[in-house]
Amino acid sequence: MLLENKVILVTGSTTGIGEAIARRCVADGAKVIIHGLEEELAKEVAQSLGASSHVVIADLADPVNCELLVRSTLEHFGRLDGLVNNAAVMTRSNIETTDVATFDRTIAINLRAPLLLIRAAMPQFRRQGGGAVVNIGSMNALCGEPNQLAYAMAKGGLMTMTRNLADAHGTEKIRFTQLNVGWTVTASERVRKKMEGLPEDWENRVPKRYAPSGRLLTPEQVAAHVVHWVSDEFAPASGVVYELEQYPMIGRMGAYGL
């Protein structure tokens, strides 16, 4: 098992991609922290995972909670081998609608919180002689859609932070990776797309220019990639920004119908 005897903190792990990551980590031998805002959902996930999991409820928009989350991990499990920064807020905004409040909340959760969590984890990584961070980014980090300005900016900043920290701390055997994830079908994505006007079975009718394989990514597929990158199996690779998508972005013309 890739993560045997490891302790992994997965933020935003009560639903969707984060939940799938937590479950896959446990399946590969790890103990995990289940984090989120909704206590009942967190308890349901933790109950199904048993003693290999522990729940911490904390709003990462409050910077104090980033240190609390790391401290709670160490108090319960005694160590921390990997951090998966998955928690994020999906913001729909453009240049007209990105006001101060929208921008600040998006940056606080999607960019500042990962930074503060990493900073809080660094002393423990150093004591243990290394550690691994996987930041869950988005293909929107490369440019983004017209209505995802603040979100794209935050994910782009996360990408730069990943490379900067990998460069700065490689000699300490602390690794940093970002997975820029493509379109993934989660429960929240299903609801969001229906609210935006797509039909009930929209995920089964996605044009192949967006899903050449005939279907979108699943949370479980994303989780499989995360487990490898957070494990020692991929050491010493660091500073990698991995595009978890079905097609190359550079040189692709299909999305424009050409």
Image: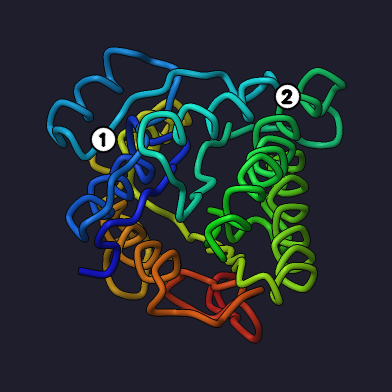
What is the x, y in percent for residue 228? 37, 71
Q: Are marks 2 and 1 in contact (CB under 8 Å)?
A: no
Q: Nearer the viewer, mark 2 or mark 1?
A: 1
What is the x, y in percent for residue 154? 73, 45
Query: Is 211 in front, or is 11?
Result: 11
Q: CA distance from mark 2 to mark 1?
A: 29 Å
Q: Residue at x 19, y 22 (%)?
A: 44
Quarter holding residue 218: bottom left
Quarter holding residue 95: top right
| Residue that label 1 marks | 53
What is the x, y in percent for residue 151? 69, 41
| Residue that label 2 marks | 105
Q: Residue furthest bottom?
A: 251
- Name the amino acid, label 2: Arg
- Name the amino acid, label 1: Ser
Task: Specify few, some or many for label 2: CA neighbours under 10 Å numbering under 14, 14-19, or 20 or more.
Answer: some
Secondary element under disc 1, as helix, strand or loop, is: strand
Query: Is 36 in front, or is 131?
Result: 131
Quadrant of the snapshot with the N terminus: bottom left
